[in-house]
Image (cartoon, rainbow, N blue to C red):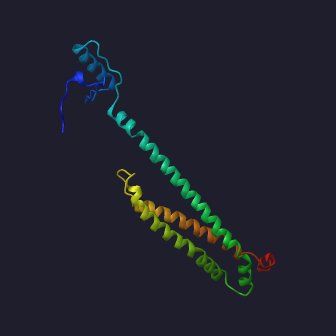
């Protein structure tokens, strides 16, 4: 619904004038100022700016919030990766004695490595599946905060799973490989 009312009843002292032109802002400002001077010599242009500047100013806080959320999300992913690496690497490192016993009893390096990888990655895979399910469940809450972006972005979900899974894989593989290279006698002495 639209309605008109006399300017005298409108208590806001400023008027917005929008001009579409291919000229520069200064050239348009001079033309509009000369037209305003013909109407009333007391009228002046306070702020002249492009529509891009107006839109950028109105979206500035929302963009800042999205950048901050993105940075905090990246930091959370980094901290999760460090935490997963530390926890999984510590549990594998604790099994150095067991690995030494297995190697002393004649187990092949590849068999021990496969065993450690399978046992180390099992809880990680369960955690990734649970995290993915929770992310899908909580995405509906986040959807109201997003504009022209889907809360169910498969690229972001895949990237997070890949980063966390690769981190856990390295956390299992590197200490297990290091433990299999240790002399079985040395590994038994640590016990």
Front one among 54 and 102: 54
Front one among 13 and 58: 13
Q: Which residue lies furthest to the front in this view?
A: 9
In this rendering, the answer to whether 175 lies above or below 29 is below
Q: Which residue lies furthest to the bottom in this view?
A: 105
**Residue 170 % position (x, y):** 60, 68
Q: Which residue lies furthest to the top in this view?
A: 41
Position of residue 22 in the picture relative to residue 65 (left or right): left
**Residue 106 % position (x, y):** 71, 87
Residue drawn at point x = 20 percent, y = 24 percent:
6
Residue drawn at point x = 29 percent, y = 27 percent:
16
Q: Tell me the quadrant of the picture where the N terminus can be found.
A: top left
Residue drawn at point x = 62 percent, y = 71 percent:
172
Q: Which residue lies furthest to the right in this view?
A: 189
**Residue 49 % position (x, y):** 35, 28
In this rendering, the answer to whether 190 lies above or below 152 is below
**Residue 70 % position (x, y):** 48, 51
């Amino acid at each position: 619904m639209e309605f008109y009312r006399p300017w005298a009843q409108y208590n806001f002292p400023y008027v917005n004038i929008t001009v579409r032109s291919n000229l520069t802002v200064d050239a348009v400002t001079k033309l509009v100022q000369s037209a305003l001077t013909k109407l009333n010599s007391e009228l002046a242009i306070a702020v002249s700016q492009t529509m891009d500047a107006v839109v950028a100013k109105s979206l500035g806080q929302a963009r800042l919030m999205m950048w901050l959320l993105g940075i905090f999300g990246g930091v959370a992913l980094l901290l999760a990766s460090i935490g997963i690496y530390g926890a999984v690497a510590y549990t594998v490192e604790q099994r150095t004695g067991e690995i030494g016993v297995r190697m002393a009893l004649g187990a092949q390096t590849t068999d021990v490595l496969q065993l450690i990888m399978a046992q180390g990655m099992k809880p990680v895979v369960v955690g990734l599946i649970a995290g993915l399910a929770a992310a899908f469940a909580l995405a509906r809450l986040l959807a109201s905060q997003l504009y022209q972006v889907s809360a169910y972005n498969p690229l972001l979900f895949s990237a997070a799973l890949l980063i966390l899974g690769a981190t856990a894989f390295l956390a299992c593989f590197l200490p297990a490989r290091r433990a299999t290279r240790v002399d079985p006698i040395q590994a038994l002495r640590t016990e």
